[in-house]
Image: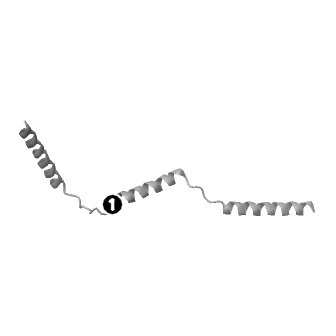
């Protein structure tokens, strides 16, 4: 009789343990949270703000020419100011 009660108690305990384990949500690690925040920030960064047009990137030669032109203007302004 004692064995039957011991088996019954063990079965109830095991059942309760299995139910408790299945209801517990898996814990998220801080690394996963940071990865999610980083992905969200990157997606927001890639989207242009409302009302602004998306400019296509200029070629390196075009950017270089713009920098040289602005430098020439700055030098000319300094010469005229002297």
Residue most toward the front? 81
Figure quadrant of the N terminus: bottom right
Q: In the rendered image, which quarter is residue 61 located in?
A: bottom left
Point 50% across, 51% down: residue: 31
Residue wearing tag 1:
49
**Residue 21 x %, y %:** 68, 60
Q: Is residue 49 left or right of residue 70?
A: right
Figure quadrant of the C terminus: top left
Q: Secondary structure at mark 1?
A: loop
Frontmost residue, 18 versus 65: 65
Q: Is residue 68 above or below residue 12?
A: above
Frontmost residue, 23 versus 56: 56
Q: Is residue 37 left or right of residue 13?
A: left
Figure label count: 1
Q: How is the image coloured?
A: one colour
Q: Is residue 37 left or right of residue 79?
A: right
**Residue 56 x %, y %:** 23, 61
**Residue 75 x %, y %:** 10, 41
Q: Residues within 10 Å of mark 1 (few under 14, many from 20)?
A: few
Point 30% across, 63% down: residue: 51
Point 23% across, 58% down: residue: 57
**Residue 69 x %, y %:** 11, 49
Point 13% across, 47% down: residue: 68
Residue most toward the right? 1
């Amino acid at each position: 009789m004692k064995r039957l009660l011991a088996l019954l108690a063990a079965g109830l305990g095991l059942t309760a343990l299995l139910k408790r384990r299945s209801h517990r949500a898996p814990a998220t690690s801080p690394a996963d949270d940071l990865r999610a925040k980083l992905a969200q920030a990157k997606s927001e960064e890639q989207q242009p703000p409302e009302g602004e047009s998306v400019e296509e990137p200029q070629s390196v030669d075009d950017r270089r020419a713009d920098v040289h032109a602005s430098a020439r203007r700055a030098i000319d302004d300094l010469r005229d100011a002297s």
